[in-house]
Image (spheres, rainbow, N blue to C red):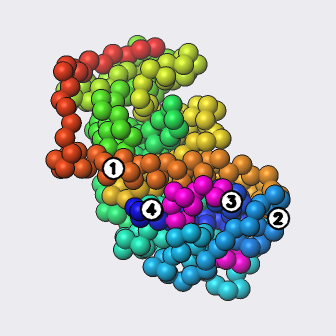
Amino acid sequence: MARKLIVGITQGDGNGISYEVIIKALADERILDMCTPVIYGSSKIFGFYKKHIHNIEQINTNVITSAKDVHQKRVNIVNCLPENVFVEPGQPTPESAKSAMTALERAVADIKEGHIDVLVTAPINKRAMVGEGFGYTGHTEYLEEQFGVDEVAMIMVTDNLKVGVVTGHIPLKDVPANITSEKILAKLRLMRNSLQRDFGVDAPKIAVLGLNPHCGDGGLLGDEEQQIILPAVKAANEEGIMAFGPYSPDGFFGLGNYQKFDAVLAMYHDQGLTPFKALAFEDGVNYTAGLPIIRTSPDHGTAYEMAGRDMADPRSMKAAIYTAIDIYNRREEYDDLIEGRMTIKAPDTEIKPRGGRIIE
């Protein structure tokens, strides 16, 4: 029997809905058939929130101090927080921020050592963590530094929609200055590689969105499309990346044109995440492409207003766990193919890239 994957799950902010969605997701016994979950946090906080959830069957837990001691048939909890940890559902506190940092740091150390196979991160309060000395604006930036990579891509994932962004957690006023042809091209390379290796898409088609209303309307509303975005699309085509656009975002999503592509590259955070969450909020997943490890997260935040009230929907957390497992397996298969341990038949026809154009 093949070894089940060990899925590390960080608790996130313990005063939000993280524990509730984790508990509800892991209450489905089918998950234990697929993987061995390891929660980084506190067994006391786990027990506190479990008491507030109705209609939950018995969850067999294994409380440990190291991921090396996991039990394959139980939900494992690595106790990495102080015994006297205090919970205030619905309230961001310095203690909850520090606990989120501790859980994340411990899980990252363990995945570096090979004690867990994939990482699923529950939602954090970025501002609270920065206030306690966390020097990053989110998980993505932290993991990029921890694993020493020059470029990563945040990709929001569901079965029929994948959306990446050129700029991530920066103020909107800083977006134009941070969009360059080189950065767009780098994101397109990452997305193409991830779609092939992580999602099994042989020849991915990627739509690129414009920055300005109506893609600048021929320069009347801005020239980034003509001066920056279109040259990046053409450069990608020259590398064999099937990138198309730029497209005007409103009509692109409003008319359902996203369904014609394997992925979409947006210029900034809300341009991509707003339509994504409108279309796939319940089961959307945040995936970080470009890391040597696999990291996913639910697509929602801490939702303090629902904490401790048995109102949180666990579907996005479940999807994050399943997606991490699927990507791990696809990567192994893809790497086997590339390394020649498996053989595939070459395609009969060659797919040639098309030149880009601005589509308003």
* Mark 2: amino acid: His
* Mark 3: amino acid: Ala
Residue 175 shown left or right of residue 54 in the figure: left
Q: Dot 3 lies on which element? A: loop
Residue 67 shown left or right of residue 196 in the figure: right
Mark 4–mark 1 distance (CA, rounded to whole Å): 13 Å
Q: Which residue is mark 4?
A: 5
Query: What numbered label is drawn on residue 52?
Result: 2
Q: Which residue is mark 1?
A: 331
Stretch of the chain drawn in magenta: 28-45
* Mark 4: amino acid: Leu
From the viewer's perspective, is the residue at label 3 or at label 2 nearer?
Answer: 3
| Discs 4, 1 touching: Cβ within 8 Å | no
Q: Which residue is mark 3?
A: 27
Mark 1–mark 2 distance (CA, rounded to whole Å): 38 Å
From the viewer's perspective, is the residue at label 1 or at label 3 nearer?
Answer: 3
